[in-house]
Image (cartoon, grey):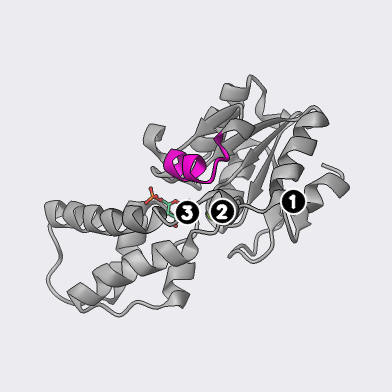
Amino acid sequence: MIKGIIFDLDGVLVFTDQYHYQAWKKLADRLGIYFDEKINHRLRGVSRRESLEILLENYHGAPFREEKKSKMMEEKNRTYRELLKNMKRSDISQSVRDTLVKLKDLGYLLAVGSSSKNAKIILERTELLPYFEFVSDGNDLRHSKPHPEVFLKAAEGLGLPPEECAVVEDAQSGICAAKAAGMKTILMQGGNCSDKVDLKIQRLEDLIECHI
Ligand code: BG6
Ligand code: MG
């Protein structure tokens, strides 16, 4: 029986794709590296470090040193953080908020399981933080998705065994992480996952009607 629902953040609760795109694009343009929305789509659910490696696939010069790569990630994150200042309460629809409240009323414990180190800032800016009992994010992780660590920590934070948790995800790496954690998988359509999942939903609101 499912007692806890763990939500991925980017692409499930909030749509930060464009901000990630603009921030990576700015860095790529400065470095003279080709980068487009199709490449950006591959970065869903992928850590900042792995995202940089994907971006650098189109760089054909001498390899960059580790220190230089760290600087690039910092630069991207500075731009991204500036863009996040645009995020506000009204970015989250009332029906999404109502859905979270209904799920709580139905007795589910709710958590966030995100690779992002900016998860808390985003949750605060959109005033989503109070809906969740626990937030597991990129700041506490040793391994990024598809490793199950982020979701196992979220389940632990909720005080539930993994098999009593369902994960809502939009990305392949997240679905693989949820499976590796032994959790039920729910895919939000529109992401980049072709894996077999337990349930598919079009919108977060569908969680109320479907049999979790
Ligand atoms: C994930 C996003 O939620 O977080 C990825 O889907 C992103 O695109 C990753 O790279 C890490 O985010 P941040 O905010 O720590 O750079
Ligand atoms: Mg995601």
Q: Are marks 2 and 3 in contact (CB under 8 Å)?
A: yes
The image quadrant where one finds the N terminus is top right
Instruction: Compare marks 2 and 3 and give the one earlier in the sequence.
Output: 2
Residue 87 has which mark?
3
Q: Which amino acid lies under the numbered mark 2 shown in the image of this protein?
A: Val
Q: Quadrant of residue 200?
A: bottom right
Q: CA distance from mark 2 to mark 3?
A: 9 Å
Tell me where the magenta segment starts and ends, as one range: 119-129
Residue 176 in the figure: left or right of residue 107? left
Disc 1: CA contacts within 10 A as few (<14), some (14-19) or many (>=20): few
Q: CA distance from mark 1 to mark 2?
A: 13 Å
Residue 35 has which mark?
none
- Asked if one can make out residue 85 in the rendered structure from this viewpoint, the answer is yes
| Residue 90 percent coordinates (x, y) | 59, 53
Is the residue 11 above or below the residue 62 in the image? Answer: above
Q: Nearer the viewer, mark 1 or mark 2?
A: 1
Q: How many marks?
A: 3
**Front residue (pair 133, 162):** 133
Asked which secondary structure carries label 3, the reply is loop
Q: Which residue is mark 2?
A: 14
Asked which secondary structure carries label 2, the reply is loop
Q: Nearer the viewer, mark 2 or mark 3?
A: 3
**Going 40% across and 44% down the picture, which residue do you hit?**
118
Q: Are marks 1 and 2 in contact (CB under 8 Å)?
A: no
Q: Which residue is mark 1?
A: 95
Residue 67 in the figure: left or right of residue 34? left
Q: Which amino acid lies under the numbered mark 1 shown in the image of this protein?
A: Ser
Asked which secondary structure carries label 1, the reply is helix
**Front residue (pair 100, 85):** 85
Q: Which amino acid lies under the numbered mark 3 shown in the image of this protein?
A: Met
Q: Are marks 3 and 1 in contact (CB under 8 Å)?
A: no
